[in-house]
Amino acid sequence: MKIISDEDFNGRIVRGLLRRFPSLDLVRVQDVGLNEKHDTKVLARAAEEDRLLLTHDFATMIDFANNRVAEGLKMPGIIAVPQDLAIGEAIDEIALLIEYSFENEWENQIIFIPLK
């Protein structure tokens, strides 16, 4: 599974995921030159690279993702995590998706964490 984390995504969650899955193909928006870029550019990059997007941005990113799907554009999926969710719980929930998902299983979907 390939993942990209949004600019404002909690770095402690990212580090926790990388500790749990040392070979996880996870990049941050900041690492690939998309710092301060519009959500549509982030989604386009995620689509180009078949990366699930980790985001805390429920305000705009979800709408832009839904617009991509409605326009027939590729959208590899979003994992939407509330900012106030405990870091350990967020890591555990995302880890479940990483461990038990198939490649491209979440295309055109938005997964809201926690999964309950």
Image: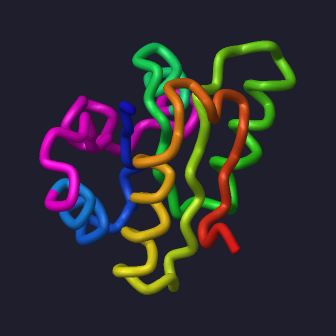
- Residue 68 relative to residue 2: left or right: right
Quadrant containing the C terminus is bottom right
Residue 75 in picture, x, y percent from top left: 64, 25
Residue at image point 33% right, 34% down? 34
Q: Magenta residues?
A: 19-42
Q: Is residue 37 above or below residue 41?
A: below
Quadrant containing the N terminus is top left
Say whether residue 113 is magenta. Answer: no
Q: Is residue 40 above or below residue 97?
A: above
Q: Is residue 85 above or below residue 48?
A: below
- Residue 2 relative to residue 19: left or right: right
Residue 59 in picture, x, y percent from top left: 69, 61
- Residue 107 relative to residue 18: left or right: right
Residue 76 in picture, x, y percent from top left: 58, 27
Q: Residue furthest right?
A: 70
Question: Which quadrant holds residue 37?
Answer: top left
- Residue 79 relative to residue 73: left or right: left
